[in-house]
Image (tube, helix red, strand yellow):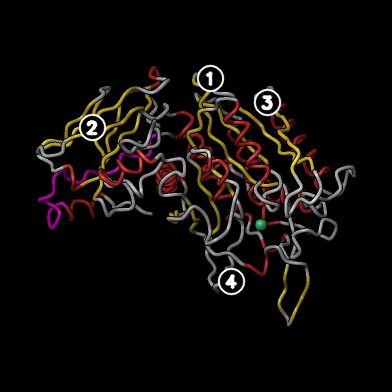
Amino acid sequence: MRVLTLTALALFASSALAAQNPPRAPEPPAPDPRIHAIVAAVSADRIRETVTRLVGFGTRHTLSDTVSDSRGIGAARRWVKAEFERISTACGGCLEVLYVSDTVGPTPRIPLRTLVVSVLAIQRGTSDTSRHVLMSGDIDSRIGDGMNATDSAPGANDNASGLAGTLEAARVLTRHRFNGTIVYAALSAEEQGLNGGQIVARYAQAHGWRITGVLNNDMIGNVQGIDGQTDATTARVFSDGTPPTETEQERTRRRSTGGEVDGISRQLARYVDRTADRYVPGLDVWMIYRLDRFGRGGHHRPFADLGYPAVRIMETHENYNRQHQNIRVENGVAYGDVLEGVDFGYAAKITALNAATLAGLSWAPAPPRTVRLGGAGQPAAVLTWAAPEDSANVAGYRVYWRRTDAPTWESSRDVGNVARHTFSGNIVDNYFFGVAAVARDGNESVVVFPGTDR
Ligand SMILES: [Zn+2]
């Protein structure tokens, strides 16, 4: 979504909204030239090379060959691990590269006990190492028959594109050091039941990761939609309105104070949206107020299921002739998820959006804690909070507000390094409020909506 320009704001302020309090205020400028450089460094050519390489494994079906060096899921995951190790060598060993695996089955789509293997590359933060952000794509592919593990299943867009974007983000971001930890995840068995994501999400939980964002990329290269539209200038970001881990008590409180479109994943989606506006030319985010595509699944879900903020990032116009299809021509229509269906410039833009978001979140402080709102029955809204874990990185806090029917934060105000802000002369009911922590370099955390942090 695009924010209003200053001129538009001035016009608004002088007319209909002039009487509103608190008034609208302009967006702060994009603060960090390093993030512009990161966006510019993402290479469509390298993404094309990576997708071509992944397609070259013939099939990456979860139940395919694991022994061959040239064909099947085993060869593919070994290549991904070697590629992360090569990236790590180029940055002086800045990545820890590991397999995270577990045996799965029998399940409806994994009939025999099968080792499901994902690959993680971890870029440790310098000051707040237990805080993690993740970017993910998938290793595995499929065709029409989801159990066919031998026929050609190139999965160029679904989902070599998302994995190639994840590898490219690692190449670009490992030229920098960050306060928080960044994890690049190549997940397996997405098509067989989100098994790789479940295994990695449990691994993160078992290792006590504080996760402030999961950016799952699944199909980021198709620009010719089945709906007849060609569009390389927008991307979709899917998110839950509220987390499924919400307790009965939290749900009851939310009914009393509001917040059904302000859960942690939705705030992350808004952060991605604003990052596109600030840093990525020619790409506008279309937030979709759903966990995922209608009735479908993706690898952000296992993280959301455990209560982590997680979104799915993808193309706006899908083409079902190019997903999960046997390669063929039927009645003059070409089917199949082949290389020719991927627009690498578009995939690079979505990758740049991911990289900018990961950089912003990882240079920023952690989000403020125990954010609470008071003010019922008073002519003031009172926002209180506590400093995050890495308070030394906090220069100050930025409070946000918007009309309750607005999709994105409309206005903000820098309030200094304090733990409380009073919006005086304001009826608390009429706006939603939130607060973000801001670093000295201007990067800021996700906005925290009162009552959504534990
Ligand atoms: Zn798929």
SS of the residue at dot 4? loop
In front of the other: label 2 or label 1? 2
The answer to whether residue 278 is visible is: no
Seen from the viewer's position, the closer of residues 102 and 79 is: 102
Distance Cα–Cα, label 3 vs label 1: 14 Å
Sequence-first tag of 4 and 1:
1
Q: Nearer the viewer, mark 2 or mark 3?
A: 2
Mark 4 and mark 1 residues within 8 Å of each other at the beta carbon: no
By secondary structure, the bulk of the magenta-drawn segment is best described as: loop
| Residue 20 on the magenta span | yes
Q: Secondary structure at mark 1?
A: loop
Element at badge 3? strand
Q: Write down the residue under mark 4.
A: 226
Residue 283 sits above or below residue 174 on the image: below
Q: Residue beneath label 3, please?
A: 96
Question: CA–CA distance between discs 4 and 2?
Answer: 47 Å
Q: Which of the two discs, 4 and 2, labels the residue nearer the N terminus?
A: 4
